[in-house]
Amino acid sequence: MQFVLDPPHGVAPVRLGMTLDETVAAVSAWGRPRVYPADAVRDFDLVSAEYGGIGFQAALERDHRVTAVTVWGPDEGEDPDVQVLLDGLDVFRTPADELLAHAAGKGRRVNNENPRAPYLPGVTVAFTRDTSQEVARDGQGLPVHFTSVLVADENYRAR
């Protein structure tokens, strides 16, 4: 199975702009998704699912439509038969620095001011390198590979 990041459109099978019902239907083939309605702590709906050790969440903010999709890499020691691809590179198996250099080589702007959370502005693809797991780390103590990736539109503002 492959999840292809398609910024700024989403991560198939979830597209930005989908309604809650459409989102739940899109991920239901993997099992029963969890739906977390907006509440006093979180002012947006959240649909959460998992496929083969890869976590998948869709945030529904403006007009209760999907505004961002986040995909989490596998837990320590897991090597699922799932790829999460950006421009043909596996986000969770390609070293983070190599993936960012590839994006820059394709003409994308890379904002790496915070090396724990670099992003590609304009399309919005945002990465995370934080984890408490025992994983390979680089000279700065950061995980060698990204631990999550978010896809949203150019107007998205992280909370």
Image (cartoon, rainbow, N blue to C red):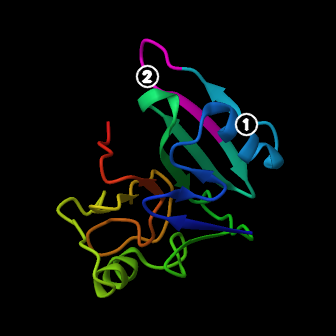
Type of amino acid at the residue the image marks with label 1? Pro
Q: Quadrant of the C terminus?
A: top left
Magenta stretch contains residue 40: yes
Residue 82 is drawn in which quadrant?
bottom right
Residue 124 is drawn in which quadrant?
bottom left
Overall secondary structure of the magenta stretch?
loop
Residue 105 is drawn in which quadrant?
bottom left
Count of numbered marks: 2
Instruction: Determine which residue is flagged by label 2.
Output: 42
- Stretch in magenta: 38-48
Magenta stretch contains residue 129: no
Type of amino acid at the residue the image marks with label 2? Arg
- Identified at 32% across, 42% down, the residue is 158
- Identified at 51% across, 65% down, the residue is 6
Distance of mark 1 from mark 2, alpha carbons?
A: 18 Å
Picture coordinates of residue 93 (x, y %)?
55, 76
Instruction: Determine which residue is flagged by label 1.
Output: 33
- On screen, 47 above or below 136? above
Q: Are marks 1 and 2 in contact (CB under 8 Å)?
A: no
- Identified at 44% across, 65% down, the residue is 146
